[in-house]
Amino acid sequence: MVKNADKDAVSLLLAVLALGRRLRSERPEGALTLSAISLLGTLGRLGPMPAVRLATEERLQPQSLTRLVGSLERDGLIERRRNAEDRRVLVIALTQAGKAALAEDLRTRQKWLQKAMAAVLTKQERAGLMAAAPAMLKLAFREQDAAER
């Protein structure tokens, strides 16, 4: 027998996955990869950081991060610079071009979402989604406890 909590979690999971797929499909042709946008978003949200922390935040293996950072640096979207407190440490930071690329990617999907919400959802449904947004972010950025791993 499936518990109601299980049904709720499955329903939410399916809805989040479907909306995520739809939002990904609304990205312009030739846009940065989703991995690149995620990395730029993390740097935009948390600020400059060493590669080790960035790999942890993005849940990437170091070699995957190295390739992605190299590509974004060649494109002028990020830069590596020395840490002011410890010159041995390289810090990865967004450039102005990186900030602009991130903003444009988000703007495109935001426009679609605003139009879709206005066309399909009632005022109460829109309010419910907006009320759920902080809780969804809390879940998205939750760290696992050591006991759960």
Image (cartoon, grey):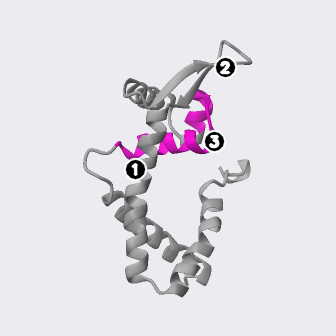
- Quadrant in the picture for residue 77: top left
**Range shown magenta:** 32-56
Label number found at residue 83 = 2
Mark 2 or 1: the one toward you: 1
x and y, in percent, of residue 91 in the image: 60, 24
Residue of label 1? 105
- Quadrant in the picture for residue 42: top right
Total labels drawn: 3
x and y, in percent, of residue 88 in the image: 66, 12
Residue of label 3? 46
Mark 3 or 1: the one toward you: 1
Q: Earlier in the sequence, mark 3 or mark 1?
A: 3
Q: Earlier in the sequence, mark 3 or mark 2?
A: 3
> Is 79 on the left-hand or right-hand side of 48?
left
Q: Residues within 10 Å of mark 1 (few under 14, many from 20)?
A: some
Residue for point 38% across, 72% down: 115
> Which type of secondary structure does the marked residue at label 3 adopt?
helix
- Name of the residue lying farthest toward the left: 29
- Quadrant in the picture for residue 70: top left
Mark 2: amino acid: Asn
Label number found at residue 117 = none
- Position of the N terminus by quadrant: bottom right
> Which type of secondary structure does the marked residue at label 2 adopt?
loop
Residue 67 included in the magenta stretch of the image: no
Q: Is residue 66 above or below residue 82?
A: below
Residue for point 66% across, 20% down: 83
Q: Main secondary structure of the magenta part?
A: helix
Mark 1: amino acid: Asp
